[in-house]
Every structure is written in C-alpha cells, then in structure tokens.
C-alpha cells in the first residue's frame, strides 16, 4: 500500500477507484467499435479450445455426370435432396431459390430438368421442358445464353448431363440390352 502512495502519489482508495474507472471507460470505448450483438454474446469456452475442437466443414454437394432421368430425383419433391436444375447441360444447385423452383413455386416445373428450350422461348409449355435446342433462332439462343450467364453467376455448378444411350445387340439369337452413358453433344462450357 505504501508503494502505491510512493509511486502514484495517491491514497490506495483513490488509486483503485481511478483504475476501476479506467476499466469502465475502456469497455465503453470498445463497445463503440464492436457489433452490440457480438459484444453481448456469452463466450463459449469450448470454441476457444483450439487443440480439441474439430470444426464441421460440410463438403460442397457435387453430382458429376448424370442422365436427365437421374436428374429428376432432384426436383424438390424430396426435401432432403438439393434442388437442381440444368441449363445447356450444366447442372446447378438452385436450392437457395426454393421459392422459385421448389414445390408450389412459379418455376417448379423446371426443377430436376434441363429447361433450356423453355428458357430460350420464355415458354411454360411442358413440351419445351427439354435441353433440345433444335430449330431455335439466333435471338432465342441469345436469350438462353443470358440465362446461362445468370445461372453461372448465381448458383454453384454441381455436374453435367450425359445422354443415356440404349443399344440393342443380337448375341446368340438373344436380345441383350446394354446401357452406357456418354456426353451429350450439347453446348459444353468450360469454367
Ligand atoms: C408475366 C411474366 C413474368 C413475370 C412478371 C416474371 C417475374 C419474375 C420475377 C419478379 C422474378 C424474380 C427475379 C429475381 O428476384 O431475381 C422472376 C424470376 C425468374 N423468372 Fe420470371 N417472370 C415472368 C415470366 C417468366 C417466363 C416466361 C420464364 C421462363 C419460361 C421465367 C423464368 C424465370 C426464372 C427461371 C426465374 C428465376 C431466376 C433465378 O433463379 O434467379 N419468367 N420472374
């Protein structure tokens, strides 16, 4: 106590009062630069333990090569599956826009499909729910390309469509069905 008086020239009571006031002022100034919600959050000690924490990083969803038929499973009818949609053969995860493409949404018919033709023609006709671009004019293809750019910017690409080719072969008079996948010859884009 004498040391405080000798060095600070203050009585111990005055010294501790001033110290406490400085802590309070420091806290107030700090709170002016921190988001109030963050500032008031209780500290979770387990998150500070760097050596024992195992952060859960979920793997981004990737589907790879699938056929149009396989893509149908991602039309939003199963809430545990991501919502996918293809444009020009490229499959995007549109789960973030469930209000557009999910069940009951205005564009739910596009989900789980390659809706390129419908988008190019701005059509809701079920016969246009296809990736077939045959007979489209230059301006319609341009409209489609604008949609493609929008999707590239907004969504994560998770795979691409491949065509399922069913080949019938004659072997020893028996009909054998062999299925194999090959890339569709649609407009491929490199990223
Ligand atoms: C009466 C005509 C239409 C109106 C008023 C309309 C309105 C809208 C609106 C307000 C949005 C939300 C935009 C945003 O927040 O980003 C939207 C999105 C969309 N529209 Fe339409 N739309 C119409 C016709 C069409 C047609 C004909 C198609 C295609 C066949 C279409 C395809 C889409 C798609 C795919 C999206 C979602 C894009 C995304 O994923 O961000 N719309 N529309």
Image (cartoon, helix red, strand yellow):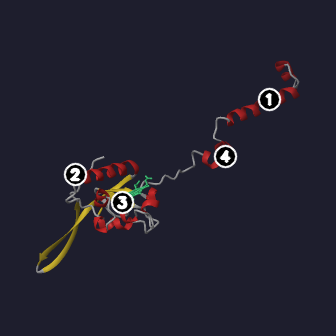
Q: Secondary structure at mark 4?
A: loop
Of callouts 3 and 1, the N-terminal one? 1
- Distance CA(mark 4)–CA(mark 2): 60 Å
Instruction: Please name the residue that numbered disc 1 is placed on.
Output: 19
Of callouts 2 and 3, the N-terminal one? 3
Residues marked 3 and 4 touching at CB (< 8 Å): no
Instruction: Please name the residue that numbered disc 4 is placed on.
Output: 43
Q: Is residue 70 above or below residue 8?
A: below
Q: Residue at x 28, y 60 (%)?
A: 117
Q: Is residue 27 above or below residue 48?
A: above
Of callouts 2 and 1, the N-terminal one? 1
Residues marked 2 and 1 touching at CB (< 8 Å): no
Q: Secondary structure at mark 3?
A: strand
Q: Secondary structure at mark 1?
A: helix
- Distance CA(mark 4)–CA(mark 1): 25 Å
Instruction: Please name the residue that numbered disc 3 is placed on.
Output: 85
Asked whether 40 or 175 is in front, the reply is 40
Q: Secondary structure at mark 2?
A: helix
Residue lying at the far bottom of the rendered structure: 173
Residues marked 2 and 3 touching at CB (< 8 Å): no
Residue 131 left/right relative to 46: left
Of callouts 3 and 4, the N-terminal one? 4
Q: Position of residue 100 (x, y in %)?
A: 43, 60
Q: Position of residue 106 (x, y in %)?
A: 42, 63
User: Is the shortest distance between ligand 1 and the CB of mark 1 under 8 Å?
Assistant: no
- Distance CA(mark 3)–CA(mark 1): 63 Å
Asked which quadrant contains residue 185, the reply is bottom left
Of callouts 4 and 1, the N-terminal one? 1
Instruction: Please name the residue that numbered disc 2 is placed on.
Output: 138
Of callouts 4 and 2, the N-terminal one? 4
Q: Is residue 40 above or below residue 174?
A: above
């Amino acid at each position: 106590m004498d040391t405080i008086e000798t060095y600070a020239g203050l009585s111990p009571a005055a010294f501790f009062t001033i110290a406490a006031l400085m802590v309070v002022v420091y806290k107030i100034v700090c709170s002016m630069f921190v988001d109030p919600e963050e500032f008031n959050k209780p500290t979770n000690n387990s998150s500070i333990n760097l050596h024992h924490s195992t952060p859960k990083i979920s793997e981004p969803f990737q589907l790879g090569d699938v056929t149009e038929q396989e893509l149908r499973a991602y039309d939003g009818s199963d809430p545990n599956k991501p919502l996918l949609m293809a444009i020009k053969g490229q499959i995007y995860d549109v789960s973030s826009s469930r209000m557009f493409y999910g069940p009951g949404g205005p564009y739910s018919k596009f989900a789980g499909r390659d809706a390129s033709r419908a988008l190019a023609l701005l059509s809701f006709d079920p016969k246009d729910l296809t990736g077939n671009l045959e007979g489209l004019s230059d301006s319609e293809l341009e409209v489609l390309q604008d949609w493609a750019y929008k999707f590239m910017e907004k969504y994560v690409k998770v795979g691409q469509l491949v065509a399922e080719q069913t080949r019938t072969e004659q072997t020893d008079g028996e009909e054998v069905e062999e299925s194999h996948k090959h890339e569709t010859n649609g407009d491929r884009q490199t990223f």
